[in-house]
Amino acid sequence: MRSLRFLVLLIGLLIAIVFIAPVQGSIRARQDSPTPTPPVVLFHDDFSTHADRWKLFNLGKASIRYDATVLRVETNSDNYALWSVPDTDLKPDQFDMTLQGTWVTGDNDALFGIVVNYRSDSDMLVATVTRGGQVRIGNYYFGVLADLAKPTQAILDAAQPVTIHAILGAAGTLDIYVNNQKLQSITLKTFRTGSFGIFASSGGSGGLNVTFNEFTISQPGQPS
């Protein structure tokens, strides 16, 4: 009789171990899950504060100015380029840059984007997207934008805000995303650290009116 009771207790104990062990394992797995690392933001501007952070100007036929809670770039001239760099000493050699803009008016070949590397007003590396969705990486040199890779096509609605995203890692690879679509990737054999900013240019038949809503730079490998 005692042997039977012992056998019943032993079976009950084994059943309890079988059911409890997976629970303990799942608890341990949850405890060992890594905590997501928040992005390390190096620079951010939502343009809601009209500080003297950006280079602003009004040339009569073109202007960059604060307007309500946005930074507005506008020109009535054809093939007219404008850019602005912030008043900061930050010159990252690796980065994750995100710019959000909204088209008001502009031809399909009008474009805006990020000054990835500003060296002077006549020498800068830019990543841009046209109102028609063409994504370009190129050197803007003395008024001419020369592509470093064949332009690609994004699927976008120009009536909605457009986000362009540029990531440069330690290997020198520059990846460009538009609305979360990866559309360009080139390797920069040499990268001389410079400043950064925003860039826009009107098309060949019409002016340009675009507002910028957000600009953020984070360390690469982190969401921005």
Image: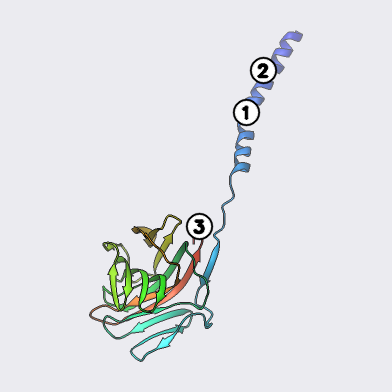
The disc placed on residue 207 is none
Q: Is residue 9 left or right of residue 195?
A: right
When asked about the image quadrant of residue 33, the answer is: top right
- The answer, for residue 80, to whether it is visible in the render is yes
Please tell me whether mark 3 sits on a helix, a strand or a loop. Answer: loop
Give the labeled residue for mark 3: 222
When asked about the image quadrant of residue 148, the answer is: bottom left
Kind of residue at badge 2:
Ile
x and y percentages locating residue 86 in the rendered image:
48, 77
Chain-order first, disc 3 or disc 1? 1
Give the labeled residue for mark 1: 19
Please, is residue 147 above or below residue 66 in the view? above
Chain-order first, disc 2 or disc 1? 2
> Callout 2: 10 Å neighbours few (<14), some, many (20+)?
few
Furthest-bottom residue in view? Answer: 60
Task: Name the residue rendered at 34%, 72% in the picture.
Answer: 159
The disc placed on residue 11 is 2
> Callout 3: 10 Å neighbours few (<14), some, many (20+)?
some
Quadrant containing the N terminus in the rendered view: top right
Kind of residue at badge 3:
Gln
- How many callouts does the rendering have? 3
> Callout 1: 10 Å neighbours few (<14), some, many (20+)?
few
Please, is residue 102 above or below residue 223 in the view? below
Please tell me whether mark 2 sits on a helix, a strand or a loop. Answer: helix
x and y percentages locating residue 218 in the rendered image:
51, 63
Please tell me whether mark 1 sits on a helix, a strand or a loop. Answer: helix
Please, is residue 200 above or below residue 156 in the view? below
Most foreground residue, 202 or 150? 150
Task: Name the residue rendered at 40%, 66% in the picture.
Answer: 163
